[in-house]
Amino acid sequence: MDRALTLLAGAGLGVGLMYVLDPQAGRRRRALARDKMMRLAHETQDAAGVVAGDMRNRAQGLASGDFSVLAGGKRALNNPWRGGWSPSARALMAFLGGGLFLYGLTRPAPTACLLGTAGLALAAEGLTNAGFDDLPRLPQNMASAAGQVAGNAGFRGQDHGARGQEKAAQPIGAGI
């Protein structure tokens, strides 16, 4: 088993190196990977700036005695399962959810399942900012996101029949 795993890891590393160091298209692939990493770094930096500014503003509100700023306002406190959380609350939920999930991995069976599920739910809420009201539209949103990812990857749909015409006839935002 250990030899097979080592062989598969070596083959995967060799294929990856061959893909990146290809003399014909390797330079382009490396440039694309570098550009994507730079874009991800800039987006992460921008998101960190937004969260830091939001936390700074909420700390000032908290110092003035308004405790509703912790959860994103009085509206978020009235219905916490609705979504619409602030950037700092979302970041806190994602980090706490991830930590709870990782802590659950160290516990025995029934406790691990509960902690892992709660942690994943918190992390998902923090990353997506979706509430329970968004659950009925989840299949439509997932199909739309999958179509966008496929389009970005260069795969175009083969179905140009009636379904494509229906989508073209819908006003923008009708599926939301």
Image (cartoon, rainbow, N blue to C red):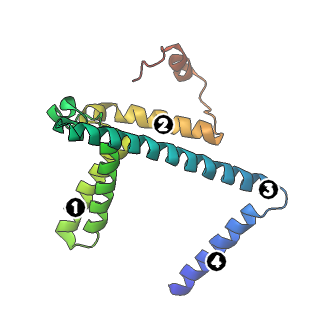
Which label was assigned to residue 79? none
Q: Nearer the viewer, mark 4 or mark 1?
A: 1
Residue at x-position 59% and y-position 76%:
8
Amino acid marked by disc 3: Arg
> Can you give x and y, in whole percent of width and height, for residue 118 in the image?
23, 55
Give the mark nearer the N terminus: 4 vs 3: 4
Amino acid marked by disc 2: Ala
Label 1 to label 2: alpha-carbon separation = 29 Å
The residue that label 3 is drawn on is 27
Q: Nearer the viewer, mark 1 or mark 2?
A: 1
Q: Is residue 105 above or below residue 3?
A: above
Q: Residues within 10 Å of mark 3 (few under 14, many from 20)?
A: few
The residue that label 1 is drawn on is 115
Q: Is residue 176 left or right of residue 68?
A: right
Amino acid marked by disc 4: Gly
The residue that label 4 is drawn on is 10
Label 4 to label 3: alpha-carbon separation = 23 Å
The residue that label 2 is drawn on is 145
Q: Nearer the viewer, mark 4 or mark 3?
A: 3
* Residue placed furthest toward the front: 64
Q: Is residue 172 left or right of residue 63?
A: right
